[in-house]
């Protein structure tokens, strides 16, 4: 499911920004705030929920499979290129956290995207797994892996999924258990949000490594790094940026979830808007 908004300006065709969230995220988790700013700046926006999540269909619910989400981005692009009053030559991809890595892979595969924005991106699943080992310890990492194996076994047996929380407190079982994860992630959610993801997703995320696609991204790419990020290691983003032909890097002295709120949201969205205006407006 997607939500399309055109800018107030009557100038057509309009440039377009396609927005997708991160790990377990849905449209309601503040994406409309970013889209509204882009609409004001003269861009059309298309927000979508990944299959299995939010308003989109797909069973089992809340099942994150990286390659399927890559396919969802390609589907959103294909849909956007058929829309009336959209300048398909001026289409940008905007992703945050896990989505910030997805847009790099999709831009590399597509080859015709005009620009990408990656906010606090997860660009190397292996680096993220190492970070989990660092802050959670080997025992917690092993427990998380065993939950994933149990979920895969239930899937093979045709049984209902086994879920774990998307975020949990340090020491508990969850996909993200860093000190700031629980409060930061849930602050974005609305009442009724299901804080759960299929446990197999925790096994699949380390296999997703957009950093391997970075060198093939031809378009201008904004990479926004949170220097105190415990979810998406900054070093992986720095390494990816060095491989990209037209990378622009902005660093913020904050943690992974701070960039969605208050002063840091304002700074981030302002930097994104300036980048998009520079590269998408004629």
Image: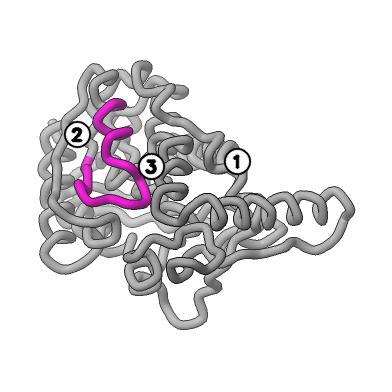
Which of the two marks, 1 or 2, is nearer to us in this view? 1
- Residue at 48% over, 69% down: 168
Which quadrant of the figure has residue 83? top left
In the image, which residues are magenta? 224-240
Q: Which residue is mark 2?
A: 280
Q: Secondary structure at mark 2?
A: helix
Q: Which residue is mark 1?
A: 68
Magenta segment includes 159: no
Question: From mark 3 to mark 2, how far is it between C-alphas?
Answer: 25 Å
Which of the two marks, 3 or 2, is nearer to us in this view? 3
Q: Residue 189 shows which numbered tag?
A: none
**Is residue 22 something one can see in this rendering?**
yes
- Residue at 53% over, 63% down: 174
In-front residue for pair 197/193:
197
Callout 1: few (<14), some (14-19), or many (20+) C-alpha neighbours within 10 Å?
few
Callout 3: few (<14), some (14-19), or many (20+) C-alpha neighbours within 10 Å?
many
Q: Is residue 103 left or right of residue 278?
A: right
Looking at the picture, does residue 139 appear above or below residue 211? Answer: below
């Amino acid at each position: 499911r997607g939500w399309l908004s055109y800018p107030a300006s009557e100038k057509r065709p309009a440039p377009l920004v396609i927005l997708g969230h991160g790990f377990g995220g849905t449209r309601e988790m503040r994406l409309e705030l970013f889209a509204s700013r882009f609409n004001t700046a003269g861009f059309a926006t298309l927000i979508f929920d990944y299959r299995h999540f939010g308003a989109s269909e797909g069973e089992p619910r809340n099942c994150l499979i990286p390659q399927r989400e890559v396919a969802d981005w390609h589907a959103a692009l294909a849909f956007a290129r058929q829309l009336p009053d959209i300048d398909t030559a001026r289409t940008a991809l905007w992703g945050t956290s896990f989505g910030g890595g997805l847009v790099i892979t999709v831009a590399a595969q597509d080859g015709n995207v005009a620009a990408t924005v990656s906010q606090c991106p997860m660009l190397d699943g292996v680096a993220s797994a190492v970070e989990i080992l660092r802050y959670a310890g080997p025992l917690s990492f092993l427990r998380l892996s065993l939950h994933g194996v149990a979920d895969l076994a239930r899937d093979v047996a045709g049984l209902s999924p086994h879920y774990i929380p998307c975020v949990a407190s340090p020491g508990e079982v969850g996909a993200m258990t860093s000190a700031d994860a629980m409060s930061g992630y849930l602050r974005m959610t609305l009442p009724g949000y299901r804080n759960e993801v299929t446990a197999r997703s925790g096994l699949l995320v380390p296999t997703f490594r957009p950093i391997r696609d970075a060198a093939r991204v031809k378009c201008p790419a904004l990479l926004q790094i949170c220097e105190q990020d415990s979810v998406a290691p900054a070093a992986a983003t720095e390494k990816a940026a060095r491989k990209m032909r037209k990378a622009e890097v902005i660093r913020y002295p904050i943690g992974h979830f701070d960039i969605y709120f208050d002063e840091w949201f304002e700074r981030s969205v302002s930097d994104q808007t300036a980048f998009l205006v520079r590269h998408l407006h004629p």
